[in-house]
């Protein structure tokens, strides 16, 4: 086994150019930990927010981003036994980051053995995107059967899973995204109709696709004018679920609009579930693994990049030039 570990780190906040490919020593697993040779690394928008230091939690410097990796156990610390034997392939969750690396140590309480039906790239979507989508559908959305659901950023990592999950539960899905390529992706995943939210007054397109009526439920993570137009696209009594603000632009709405239209808004933060509702998160994770293994849920891997090109992966993600899951591949 090599004694060198390459990783991506940043020592100051800023644009993607602050991400540096560096060499370091191989980490040593402590009690209750395993050493993983990493085969795939999930890239999430939270990594971008960490790099900018706009994440809801402070980001220490220097910092190695990355909260989800797939890897094979190469070593164990004290107190480790089955099912975490040498050679086991697992999805590892790294709550404090550190995943952009060839080798990582991970606590076994955050390691999930993977069935052979789920490949490495697909597995990187299970933790953040998969459990986010599943928890929002099961804990916030309620019964979507027979309801019209608009999913913004429908070709993205979470959005593409929401399209499928809402269809599995009997919803009528209108996918909203920017540009024809992304709308084609959403259609291929089962969306009943599509709208381009770069168009002005696209809420009227939603109503036209829904027999003149607004949507019962909208999943929103773009922010700015997309958020504003999403509120206009809701039917009276509708429900808006907000789980991000990828544009960095705040929406603007008169609070009385919620009263006048009898609509409601819910917020979702995965970290809150990890901290306060861990059993619900574990249940959602298991459900997603089962759906993926059974072929009922598909993960679209947008782009893969060598680990050394993490900065380019961040540039594409920030430019909204990706569809589905973005994955880094170590070259070790």
Image (cartoon, grey):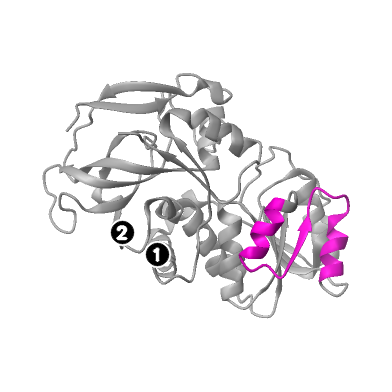
**Vertical order, 14 against 298 (above or below):** above
Which comes sooner in the sequence, label 1 or label 2?
A: 2
**Vertical order, 330 against 275 (above or below):** above
Q: Quadrant of the N terminus?
A: top left
Mark 1 secondary-structure assignment: helix
- Say if mark 1 contacts mark 2, CB within 8 Å: yes
Q: Is residue 184 on the magenta stretch?
A: yes
Which residue: 85% across, 50% down? 199
Residue under numbered circle 1: 289
Q: Where is residue 185 in the image (x, y as percent from the top left)?
A: 64, 57
**Vertical order, 126 against 72 (above or below):** below
Is 54 situated left or right of 247 in this image?
left
Which residue: 70% across, 76% down? 147
Q: Is residue 79 on the magenta stretch?
A: no
Residue 59 visible here: no
Magenta-highlighted residues: 181-209
Say which quarter of the image contains residue 105. top left
Q: Quadrant of the C terminus?
A: top left
Q: Position of residue 66 (x, y in %)?
A: 42, 38
Say which quarter of the image contains residue 23. top left
Which residue: 51% across, 21% down? 18
Image mark for residue 114: 2
The span from disc 1 to disc 2 (Cα, nearest Å) is 8 Å
């Amino acid at each position: 086994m090599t004694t060198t570990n390459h990783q991506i780190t940043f020592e100051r906040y800023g644009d993607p150019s602050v991400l540096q490919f560096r060499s370091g020593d191989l980490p040593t697993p402590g009690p209750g930990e395993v050493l993983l040779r990493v085969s795939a690394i999930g890239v999430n928008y939270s990594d971008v927010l960490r790099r900018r230091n706009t994440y809801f939690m402070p980001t220490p410097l220097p910092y190695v981003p990355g909260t989800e990796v797939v890897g094979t156990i190469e070593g164990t610390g004290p107190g480790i036994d089955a099912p975490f034997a040498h050679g086991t392939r697992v999805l590892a969750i790294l709550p404090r980051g550190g995943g952009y690396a060839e080798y990582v140590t991970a606590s076994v309480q955050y390691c999930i053995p993977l069935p052979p039906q789920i490949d490495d790239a697909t597995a990187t979507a299970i933790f953040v995107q998969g459990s986010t989508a599943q928890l929002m559908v099961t804990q916030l959305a309620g019964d979507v059967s027979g309801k019209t659901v608009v999913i913004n950023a429908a070709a993205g990592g979470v959005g593409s899973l929401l399209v499928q999950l809402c269809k599995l539960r009997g919803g009528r899905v209108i996918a909203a995204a920017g540009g024809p390529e992304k709308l084609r992706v959403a259609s291929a995943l089962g969306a009943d109709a599509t709208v381009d939210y770069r168009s002005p007054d696209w809420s009227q397109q939603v109503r036209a696709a829904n027999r003149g009526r607004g949507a019962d439920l909208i999943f929103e993570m773009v922010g700015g004018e997309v958020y504003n137009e999403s509120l206009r696209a809701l039917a009276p009594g509708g429900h808006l679920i907000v789980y991000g603000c990828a544009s960095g632009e705040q929406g603007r709405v008169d609070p009385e609009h919620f009263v006048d239209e009898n609509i409601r808004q819910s917020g979702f933060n995965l970290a809150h579930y990890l901290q306060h509702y861990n059993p619900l998160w574990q249940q959602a994770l298991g459900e997603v693994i089962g759906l993926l293994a059974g072929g009922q849920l598909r993960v679209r891997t947008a782009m893969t990049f060598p680990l050394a090109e993490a900065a380019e992966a961040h540039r594409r993600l920030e430019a909204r030039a990706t569809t589905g899951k973005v994955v880094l591949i170590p070259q070790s």
